[in-house]
Image (cartoon, grey):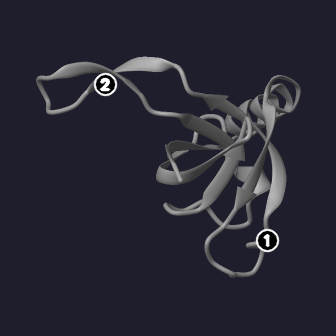
């Protein structure tokens, strides 16, 4: 990791620790390092515009969660569960964000 990316990841992690909120992450598998854990994350369940079919914008609510890669020995996977604000969600998609060292997850209610 370059110095800049390393510093950006450290800064993002520090901000997440102070502005994020606690969530419980529960992996579906029992791989090493796959225990349930409490982590700080950004959670967003606000409505936003999505492009559904390439030409069909719609306002939808797709909860999203941003997790620090450094909190996970293995990447989160679809079907892993997260409890945020008292609601249990399943991870639907996971994308790595190399700029700040996070996992960007789209969620659906479990």
> Does 48 sit left or right of 65 as displayed?
left
Whether residue 97 is visible to the viewer of this picture, yes or no, is no
Q: Secondary structure at mark 1?
A: loop
Q: Is residue 36 above or below residue 30?
A: above
Q: Is residue 25 above or below residue 39?
A: below
Q: Return the x and y of residue 7 as percentages of the image width and height.
A: 78, 33
Q: Quadrant of residue 41?
A: top right
Residue closest to the eye, 18 or 92: 92
Mark carried by residue 35 = 1
Q: Furthest-left residue in view?
A: 55
Q: Return the x and y of residue 76 as percentages of the image width and height.
A: 60, 59
Residue closest to the eye, 88 or 32: 88
Q: Quadrant of residue 43?
A: top right
- Residue at the disc numbered 2: 50
The alpha-carbon separation of the residues under discs 1 and 2 comes to: 33 Å
Q: Return the x and y of residue 48 as percentages of the image width and height.
A: 41, 18
| Residue visible at 11% across and 23% down in the picture | 55
Q: Is residue 31 above or below residue 34?
A: below
> Does 37 sit left or right of 57 as displayed?
right
Residue closest to the eye, 4 or 44: 44
């Amino acid at each position: 990791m370059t110095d800049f990316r390393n510093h950006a990841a450290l800064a993002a992690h520090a901000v997440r620790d102070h502005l994020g909120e606690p969530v419980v992450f529960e992996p579906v598998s029992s791989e090493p390092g796959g225990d349930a854990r409490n982590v700080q994350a950004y959670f967003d369940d606000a409505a936003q515009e999505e492009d559904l079919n390439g030409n069909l914008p719609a306002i939808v609510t797709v909860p999203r969660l941003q997790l620090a890669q450094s909190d996970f020995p293995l990447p989160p996977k679809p079907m892993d569960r997260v409890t945020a604000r008292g609601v249990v969600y399943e991870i639907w998609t996971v994308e790595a964000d190399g700029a700040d060292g996070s996992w960007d997850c789209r969620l659906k209610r479990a």
